[in-house]
Image (cartoon, rainbow, N blue to C red):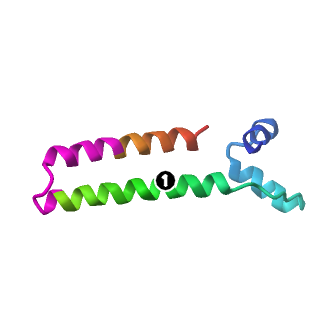
């Protein structure tokens, strides 16, 4: 809905749409449960990467495991960037 409003109003960002709603008094309730779930998943990815880094530093895991973890983190960041710029 916000993306459609952004395009319809010819704003450059969703933040501008939200500000316009707030200033005009037209505030709506949004379902943010998807955002919470997304945030939880991102947090879990970060925790997993930290565990990999700790195990590499402790000599338990191989440096290749750390490289794989960093590659996956890069993929997550790329996906987040694409989602944010839709």
On screen, residue 76 versus residue 66, left or right, reads right
In the rendered view of the protein, which quadrant contains the N terminus? Answer: top right
Instruction: Write down the residue under mark 1.
Output: 41
Residue visible at 33% across and 56% down? 48
Of residues 54 and 70, the one drawn nearer to the viewer in this rendering = 54
Q: Is residue 24 left or right of residue 64?
A: right
Q: Position of residue 11 (x, y in %)?
A: 74, 43
Residue 70 magenta-highlighted: yes
Is 37 above or below relative to 72?
A: below
Q: Position of residue 76 (x, y in %)?
A: 42, 44
Q: Quadrant of the C terminus?
A: top right
Total of numbered circles in the picture?
1
Q: Give the residue displayed 62% in from the left and 54% down from the top.
A: 35
Residue lying at the far left of the rendered structure: 59
Please tell me in which quadrant of the rendered image residue 4 appears. top right
Observer-nearest of 75 and 43: 43
**Disc 1 secondary structure class:** helix
x 23%, y 58%: residue = 53
List the single residue furthest toward the front: 60
In the image, the segment drawn in magenta is 56-72
In this view, the residue in front, 29 or 20, is 29
Q: Quadrant of residue 83?
A: top right
The question of residue 86 being in magenta is answered with no
- Residue 12 location, x and y as percent? 68, 42
**Whole-percent x and y of residue 50?**
29, 60
Q: Is residue 52 left or right of residue 72?
A: left
Q: Residues within 10 Å of mark 1 (few under 14, many from 20)?
A: few
Residue sitting at 21 percent across and 49 percent down? 66
């Amino acid at each position: 809905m916000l993306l459609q409003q952004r395009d319809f109003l010819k704003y450059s960002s969703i933040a501008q749409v939200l500000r316009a709603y707030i200033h005009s008094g037209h505030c709506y309730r949004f379902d943010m449960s998807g955002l919470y779930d997304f945030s939880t998943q991102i947090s879990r990815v970060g925790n997993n990467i930290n565990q990999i880094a700790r195990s590499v530093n402790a000599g338990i895991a191989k440096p290749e495991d750390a490289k794989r973890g960093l590659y996956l983190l890069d993929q997550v960041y790329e996906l987040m960037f694409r989602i944010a710029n839709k």
